Image (spheres, rainbow, N blue to C red):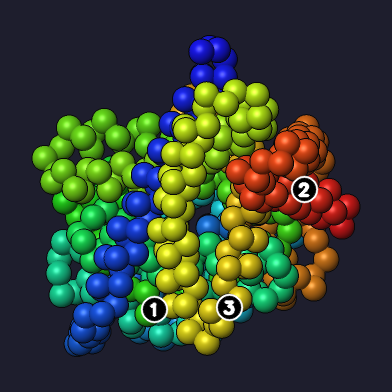
């Protein structure tokens, strides 16, 4: 039996096994979430007779499109003025500084306790700004909103009571809403993916008592929890996930409330989306590298350890997808030339049923997010989402590998446009570099595999190559198009 074709088949088979395990993990979370939704709703705890001191932190860096909006939204929070402190943690180097100073002065004149905090440098990026802000406030609880968020006035009144009924609650996290979901196809696809995380993953893990994560914004921390867990660290790009695991390993409990929604703006251009995806995927790999050993040495239940491993290694799926994709084209020729592998390929076709739980997972989230959605529209939208996600595999797999290797990279924030994209773009996170060129080359590569399958009359990999060709072509196209805007 030829060694190279055998190696290709074995590697591809191992990738399929990983995808099945990933899909089954999502299926388990879907079952848990559905059980949570089927039970009686948890009532909001009663309002306290005396509200505790809360500090709202707004970490900013060059966000002149949205800075005034987020400051005004937090200034409108319905909370006793003598118990509220708003910190504008402004590391900006452009006109954002003046805009923020003007809004802070305006709200100070209205009697609000709001401060404009400027550091001499941007050391530690967002985590460094949050850590520095804590040295200049005495708030017992810390609410955090990124620049693109617009919290509703009742946000604190709805979240704070959960802390007051249980002193071991370290975080109350809320669900992200979408201010500009219908702006473009790109924003609709992002909303589709984020809704699955917030409506299924977070709910399922919370229901089962597994570890969840603070999502970096749209939530509130108990300050003593931050201190007990060691404070904000700057050695990963996902300081939120890192601190979440350190806190939960210390025994703190996290509360997730999907009915409390914090609206936010989705990235409307490909370079902004890629910068966000890079942070999330690389940061998750860095956090896995940092905490998996500690977590497995802990006395946590086995089920919690397994789910935490699945959680921290979620982004690894992009590495596997990329490897599968690269192997799939030569496999078209192996299928045509080596008949002795036919039984193996037939068994592999059965393994493709492992994608069914993934379809169920996203369908459940899709209906929960928009109960009026028509079921017949789901298959096409799901395939489009799957295709574009595959198209991001090269970009995200690189981020994961860098995270595993421990290579440090700067924190590149996700620029927002504000006002549903009608504001002129002032910020970019990259142009048409080598990676975009490679995405275009890969689109041609997978189109070649598609053509080869048609030539040999073998439809086994045609669906996969169709999704890959469209996904990489779409990501390359939007990357070039948006870089020219």
Task: State how far apart marks 1 and 3 are (Cα).
Answer: 29 Å
The residue labelled by disc 2 is 473
Q: Position of residue 6 (x, y in %)?
A: 51, 19
Task: State how far apart marks 2 and 3 are (Cα).
Answer: 26 Å
Residue 79 in which image quadrant: bottom left
Q: Residues within 10 Å of mark 3 (few under 14, many from 20)?
A: few
Q: Are marks 1 and 2 in contact (CB under 8 Å)?
A: no
Q: Position of residue 58 (x, y in %)?
A: 51, 63
For this rendering, which residue is in front, 134 or 110? 134
Nearer the N terminus, badge 1 or badge 3?
Answer: 1
Report the side of 4 relative to 352 (left or right). Answer: right
The residue labelled by disc 3 is 376
The residue labelled by disc 1 is 260
Q: Residues within 10 Å of mark 1 (few under 14, many from 20)?
A: some
Res 86 visible:
no
Nearer the N terminus, badge 2 or badge 3?
Answer: 3
């Amino acid at each position: 039996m030829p060694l190279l074709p055998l190696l290709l088949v074995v590697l591809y088979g191992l990738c399929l096994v990983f995808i099945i395990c990933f899909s089954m993990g999502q299926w388990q979370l879907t079952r848990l979430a559905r059980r949570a939704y089927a039970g009686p709703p948890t009532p909001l705890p009663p309002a306290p007779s005396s509200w505790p001191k809360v500090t709202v932190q707004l970490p900013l860096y060059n966000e002149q499109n949205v800075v005034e909006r987020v400051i005004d939204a937090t200034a409108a929070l319905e909370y006793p003025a003598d118990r509220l402190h708003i910190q504008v943690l402004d590391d900006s180097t452009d006109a954002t500084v003046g805009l923020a100073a003007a809004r802070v002065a305006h709200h100070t004149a209205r009697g609000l306790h709001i401060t404009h905090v400027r550091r001499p440098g941007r050391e530690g990026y967002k985590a460094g700004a949050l850590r520095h802000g804590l040295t200049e406030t005495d708030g017992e609880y810390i609410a955090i909103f990124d620049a693109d968020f617009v919290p509703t006035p009742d946000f604190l009144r709805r979240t704070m009571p959960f802390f007051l009924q249980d002193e071991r609650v370290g975080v109350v996290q809320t669900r992200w809403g979408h201010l500009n979901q219908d702006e473009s196809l790109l924003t609709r696809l992002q909303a589709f993916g984020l809704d699955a995380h917030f409506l299924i993953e977070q709910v399922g893990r919370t229901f089962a008592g597994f570890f969840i994560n603070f999502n970096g914004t749209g939530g509130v921390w108990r300050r003593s929890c931050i201190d007990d867990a060691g404070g904000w660290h700057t050695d990963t790009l996902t300081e939120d996930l890192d601190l979440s695991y350190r806190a939960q390993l210390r025994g703190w409990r996290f509360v997730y409330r999907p009915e409390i929604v914090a609206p936010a703006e989705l990235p409307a251009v490909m370079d902004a989306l890629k910068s966000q995806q890079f942070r999330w995927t690389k940061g998750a790999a860095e956090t896995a590298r940092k905490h998996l050993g500690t977590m497995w040495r802990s006395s946590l239940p086995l089920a919690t350890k397994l789910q935490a491993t699945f959680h921290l290694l979620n982004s690894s799926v992009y590495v596997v997808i990329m490897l599968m994709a690269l192997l799939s084209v030569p496999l078209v020729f192996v299928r045509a030339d080596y008949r002795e592998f036919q039984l193996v390929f037939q068994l592999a076709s059965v393994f493709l049923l492992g994608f069914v739980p993934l379809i169920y997972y996203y369908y459940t989230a899709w209906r929960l997010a928009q109960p009026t959605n028509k079921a017949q529209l789901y298959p096409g939208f799901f395939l489009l989402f799957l295709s574009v996600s595959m198209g991001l595999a090269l970009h995200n797999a690189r981020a994961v590998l860098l995270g595993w290797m421990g290579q440090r990279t700067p924190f590149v924030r996700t620029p927002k446009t504000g006002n549903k994209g009608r504001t002129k773009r002032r910020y970019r996170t990259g142009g048409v570099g080598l990676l975009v060129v490679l995405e275009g080359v890969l689109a041609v590569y997978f189109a070649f595999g598609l053509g080869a399958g048609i030539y040999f009359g073998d439809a086994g990999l045609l669906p996969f190559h169709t999704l890959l060709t469209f996904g990489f072509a779409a990501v390359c196209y939007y990357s070039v198009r948006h870089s020219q805007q």
